[in-house]
Amino acid sequence: MRLNPLTARKLRRFREIKRGYYSFVILVVLTVLSLFAELLINDKPLLIKYEGQLMFPTYGSVKLGSAFGLEGQAANTPVNYRELARTFQAEDDGNFVILPPVPYNPYENTEVGGLFRAAPPDFASKHFLGTDTTGRDILARLFYGFRTAILFAIAFTVLTYLIGIALGCMMGYFGGLFDLLFQRIIEIWSNIPFLYMVIIVFSVIPATFSIPTRISILLLIMVLFSWTFMTYYMRTETYREKARDYALAARVLGASTSRIIFRHILPNTISTIVTFIPFTVVAAITAITALDFLGWGLPPPTPSIGELLKQGTANLTTAPWIVTSAFVALVVILTLVTFIGEAIREAFDPKKFTIYR
């Protein structure tokens, strides 16, 4: 697909802003890696060779110890692949287990001295950032928490913009009673306290609801209380664009309403809308982290940066590595997205906001 000269020039300008461009590359790489987190951070191995057979259990079902010749109690319980790797290594009969670089899943509790407690970073046991207060690997929970946060933020942004752009265009284009009615609805809706609604809804949701369902409900609530800012912006832009000569000429030539909106008005407002996207992602990540910190965000035991921050602040003196890891991870993520936003704003907006060297 060949880009028009103006879009190509904007993309070249974006690539020239090194801080934003490299931040974009890093964030994309991290996001792609997080989609395959099970291959990097998991208690299931990448490959097992047992009695001449090759197995790939990463995305497979749980296997019992009896499938690998274990006896006694271990034969009837889910196999511990780390222990199985040590067993195969000691037997030295050609069987082997290849584990991911971090051989723990984000939900697994690891005993330290017979107790489930926070442990400092230990490279020998491959707890590179230590464990939290229940013995779960912090790096695993941060990486899976990043995946949850970034996907949540992307879904939030897409849904918010779809609703806001659609309603804003209709309000700005049709005006009149339709515009007046939705302005009053938005004024009333904007005064409903968002946090109270989250608390009320999650107080009445049955505990039997699955984690994906609860996450979807949280996403829906956040979207329902966040679409108004884009609606007002699109309403203003549509009012301005529909009064321009090219829109009036299209109407005189008999162009339909949908053609005027999709072929004329939206293409002339989309470049400014793009500059808002990274900052909306930042707002979504910050909001979900804050809700998790307060205990009204993602349902436990979902990996979450906000939940780790809550643990860390509660154990600041006894386990400082928890809050340090979570805080650094959050700052890095928000910094990357902010740099991307600044670069996009500089590249796509005709005005100069920042000077880059």
Image (cartoon, rainbow, N blue to C red):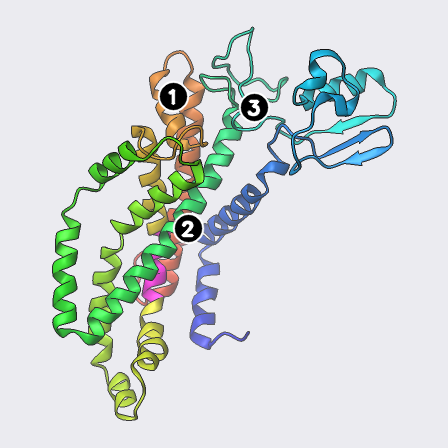
Figure check: 348 above or below 320: below
From the viewer's perspective, tell me whether residue 44 is left or right of residue 254: right
Residue 145 on image: x %, y %: 46, 35
Tag 2's secondary structure? helix
From the viewer's perspective, tell me whether residue 42 is left or right of residue 20: right
Tag 3's secondary structure? loop
Where residue 356 sits, quadrant-wise, is: bottom left
Q: Is residue 278 magenta?
A: yes
Callout 2: few (<14), some (14-19), or many (20+) C-alpha neighbours within 10 Å? some
Figure check: 95 above or below 220: above
From the viewer's perspective, tell me whether residue 104 is left or right of residue 203: right
Kind of residue indicated by mark 1: Gly
Q: Residue furthest bottom?
A: 253
Q: N-terminal of the two: label 2 or label 1?
A: 2
Q: N-terminal of the two: label 1 or label 3?
A: 3
Kind of residue indicated by mark 2: Ile
The magenta span reads 271-279
Figure check: 293 above or below 264: above
Residue beneath the point at 36% across and 79% down: 263
Q: N-terminal of the two: label 2 or label 3?
A: 3
Residue beneath the point at 44% across and 64% down: 13
Q: CA distance from mark 1 to mark 3?
A: 17 Å
Residue beneath the point at 35% across and 67% down: 271
Tag 1's secondary structure? helix
Say the numbered circle drawn on residue 155: none
Q: CA distance from mark 2 to mark 3?
A: 29 Å
